[in-house]
Image (tube, helix red, strand yellow):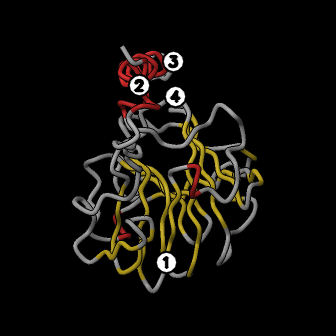
Amino acid sequence: MHPLLFQPFFDFLACCQRLTYFPDDELNLSAPREPPPEVKLDLSSAGPTVVLLKNCLRICGHGCARSVVPILQDKAYFEVKIQCTGHWAVGLCSSKTPLASVENLGIDKASWVLREDSCVWYSGVKLARLKTPLEEGSVLGLTYDHVELRFYINGAATGLINEQSAQSMDGWTGMKGVLYPVVGVAENAVLDVGFNRKHFYFPPPQSDFKEILFEKELL
């Protein structure tokens, strides 16, 4: 029998043998992986007069918005760039904090925020102020490890001065509960948030502080 008659069979065997050397990921060329979901501001819970742009990473208008997920990991880092100054607040809040107005942040007992006056507010009380004041165009970094909230300006650590004792502090403690990053604006303020490393202007101050992750990414 002519050897060419067996050529298709030999080609089939060779193909099967070759396939055994390729992992499934390389074989499934027609079905590319979907990118992981990205943490951003939550439009569904945001204040009614808030405007969210740039895939829900920019806030303007009037009111507040929190991230779509709370901080569940041990150590988290996120950034906020002050694109346009005005009346604004940045920090942490619970799911119960009202988000209709920036005035609500730092007033209740479940939100801790830094305002445009470079002061930390909680329960209607000015707790501390930054050693380095913020300006338009500054990038504010925040780290949170479920014990202490620290602030960074353009990649450099900036401590706090306690308003009552005038003592120097590295950060603020006393936060509790399940907390979300939150931002609020009014009076023409515009803020850009970065919860994912691809949106960071500066790396986290320590390698164990990570971008904010979804719960399934922590498993």
Q: Which residue is mark 3?
A: 21
Mark 4 residue type: Asp
Q: Residue at x 51, y 18 (%)?
A: 21
- Secondary structure at badge 3 equals loop
State the quadrant of the N terminus. top left
Q: CA distance from mark 4 to mark 1?
A: 29 Å
**Disc 4 or 1, which lies upstream in sequence?**
4
Q: Nearer the viewer, mark 3 or mark 2?
A: 3
The residue carrying pointer 4 sits among few (fewer than 14), some (14 to 19) or many (20 or more) residues within 10 Å by Cα, namely: few
Q: Which residue is mark 2?
A: 24
Q: Nearer the viewer, residue 58 or 61?
A: 58
Q: Position of residue 217 (x, y in %)?
A: 42, 31
**Disc 4 or 3, which lies upstream in sequence?**
3
Q: Is 84 displayed left or right of 153 in the figure?
A: left
Q: Nearer the viewer, mark 4 or mark 2?
A: 2
- Secondary structure at badge 1 equals strand
Q: Residue at x 46, y 19 (%)?
A: 14
Q: Nearer the viewer, mark 3 or mark 1?
A: 3
Q: CA distance from mark 3 to mark 1?
A: 53 Å
Q: Which residue is mark 1?
A: 190
